[in-house]
Amino acid sequence: MGRLIKVLSHSPLARPLPAVSLSALGLAGVAVVGLCATAPKSSAATPPVLLPLTDLARNLGAPHLPDDVADAIMYVSLVLCCLGLAMMLWANSHGWTPSPRKAFAAAAGCVAVLVNITPVGSGDTASYAAYGRIAALGHNPYTFLPAQLPGGSHNPYTAIVNPEWRNSPSEYGPVATWEHMFAALIGGTRPWLTIWILMILAGVAYLATGYVLMRTAANPARAVLLWAANPIMIVELVMSGHLDAFLSLVAIAAIAVARRGTTMRHDLIVGVLVGVAGSIKVTAVFVALAIAIPLIHDRAWHRLIRTAVVAGLTTIVLYAVSGWGLTALEPLRAESKLVISPSVWRLAEVIIQQVNGGQLPSVVPTIFGLLSWPLMLALAWYLYNRLSPDVPTVVAATCALTFAWVIVVPWSLPWYTSTAWVALALLPRNTLTRWLTIVTGGLALLHFNGGFPGNPKLGPTP
């Protein structure tokens, strides 16, 4: 791998035009799969809805891509995205310094187009829409299931949710559910419109994060390349419409304020932002821990206490005013026992099943979850020490913790790396960049579906 990286980093591809071209080709390939999602069938990864540009492509006679062809295009496109990103970063290290504003504007134009295409690579947006519809109807999305919506599998929202998740309640915090409900209130009985709003909101959050990074990073050009113009992140957060775009936005805001000052006002703002992040996804705990580490190191106990108290109170208030209370935490128990394949934990499950006559003791996933924490902290410590001691502790700790979590956690998906990318964009050039690219790209190749063709009846055409 080291030899391959050395060859590629000094190849003709590591120049601005070839690097940008590879990235554009990768994004275009994924977009083609979304534009050709036109046949009425089901899939695990992309909801069967037609957003405006996909609907337009269908009306213009865009051919339906067979599953094998769509998968092949996705594999090639994701590889091109990763290769394009690597080449842009190597070109940057060789002296290419693009205008941050122009690069950001180009990325914004790309995002503005892509949010109008049927999401590709994940079916999560369909679940988001269903949870939002449940909340809009006055039900509790943490106890009321998508399959329980009126009409069951014939309900337009239930129909677009992957059957594997129709009996799963929401696993997201109240702030996330409010966003889902906002989109569903606009969408009403039209799930395609709800998903379109969710895509637009994810795109806005993604660009807002890029803008904050561009304004706060010591090297704005590198920050834009690592986030706003990062093709693999555009695929995972924008083209898939993932909620992690919002988590990344709040995380970078908390990190930026924590670095800016040490007054009580700064600590209060950081505490509120951490509480909001924790009310989006529980993985915000790693951002909170990263913010606490430098305070513990400096023995700034009064700052640590007031920040923690504000963060805790904010989280409690948000959960309380939502009306769903602690029921919002119940689904996390089931989620914590999930093990994805392929992973070392899945391999361990298979071995235990073989030894135990095909049976898996119910306690095994719990043990895996407990073991993952010390392993994650050990790996995070190793990664942290690979970074320069001159970099801000809060940024280095965020990058190390979130990266280690993605590698060690039993259930890991490519969009989980988003917070690590946010922190990495604030750091100077380092070896973690190549490994985060490889890990994100590897997860993307392992966990996607080449297209979940939409049902014409669910599209925007009358």
Image (cartoon, rainbow, N blue to C red):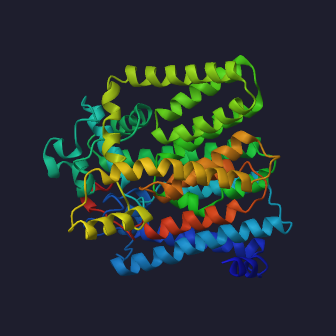
Q: Residue visible at 33% across and 22% down?
A: 323
* In the rendered image, the vertical position of residue 177 relative to residue 413, given as above or below: above
Please indicate whether residue 459 sits to the left or right of residue 4 in the image.
left
Identity of the residue drawn at 73% across and 67% down? 88
Q: Is residue 321 visible?
A: yes
Identify the residue at image location x=72%, y=24%.
Answer: 300
Most extreme residue toward the left is 151
Residue 35 lies in quadrant? bottom left
Q: In the depicted view, which residue is nearer to us: 78 or 390? A: 390
Q: Quadrant of residue 58?
A: bottom left
Q: Where in the figure is residue 47, as x and y percent of width and height?
A: 33, 58
The residue furthest front is 355
Give the residue furthest to the right. 95
| Residue 453 seen anywhere in this rendered image of the structure | no
Which residue appears at 37% of the width and 74% of the height? 61
Q: Does residue 5 appear left or right of residue 54 in this picture? A: right
Point out residue 153 in the picture as x, y percentages from the top left corner. Answer: 16, 52
Identify which residue, 412 or 192, lies in the foreground.
Answer: 412
Is residue 374 shown above or below 291? Answer: below
Q: How many marks?
A: 0
Quarter of the image where the C terminus is located:
bottom left
In the image, 82 versus 262, the foreground residue is 262
- The image position of residue 442, as x and y in percent, is 52, 69
Q: Position of residue 350 (x, y in %)?
A: 32, 68
Classify the position of the N terminus by image quarter.
Answer: bottom right
